[in-house]
Amino acid sequence: QVQLVESGGGLVQPGGSLRLSCATSGYIFSINAMGWYRQTPGKQRELVATIRSGDSTNYADSVKGRFTISRDNAKNTVYLQMNSLKPEDTAVYYCNADLYTDWRRRSEYWGQGTQVTVSS
């Protein structure tokens, strides 16, 4: 069974930086895409950034120029470098993976979430 485990969240002052990591465990045949989403109470989960095989990336307009998604293919791990953080970035951040566990079995997985709080 594939699992995703996020780390790196915490409390940071406005203008500060954090780096989130999402490590995978279990057998993975191949990965289509990995990404980060976030959610605040009472709101729908929203896309932050994704990275596809071939390393093409996509960002929410609200984080462009401040956040960078990257991936270590050897470790099947994805990172989110967050700079110039704002209070409105406060949310639970979730890792997502769209992957194959064998040549024909495609599934989507979510991590348990990590809290990011931006406050002075």
Image: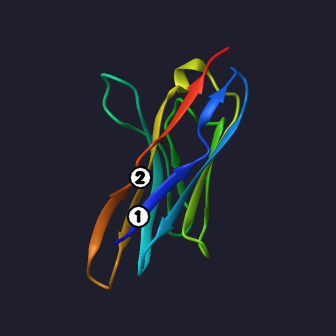
* Res 77 quadrant in image: bottom right
- In which quadrant is the N terminus drawn? bottom left
For residue 3, the mark is 1
**Which quarter of the rendering shows the C terminus?**
top right
At 34% from the left edge and 59% from the top edge, which residue is drawn? 109
Q: What x and y, as percent, mark residue 33?
A: 44, 62
- In the displayed structure, does residue 11 sit left or right of residue 93? right
Q: Is residue 68 above or below residue 46?
A: below
Q: x%, y% of residue 88?
A: 53, 20
Q: Is mark 2 on a helix, strand or loop?
A: loop
Q: How crowded is mark 2: few (under 14 residues within 10 Å), some or many (20 or more)?
A: some
Image x and y of residue 35, in percent = 47, 52
What's the amino acid at mark 1? Gln
Marker count (numbered): 2
Residue 104 to residue 62: above or below: below
Q: Badges 2 and 1: C-beta atoms under 8 Å apart?
A: yes
Q: Is residue 88 above or below residue 60?
A: above
Q: Name the residue under label 2.
A: 111
Residue 63 is tagged as: none
Q: How crowded is mark 1: few (under 14 residues within 10 Å), some or many (20 or more)?
A: some
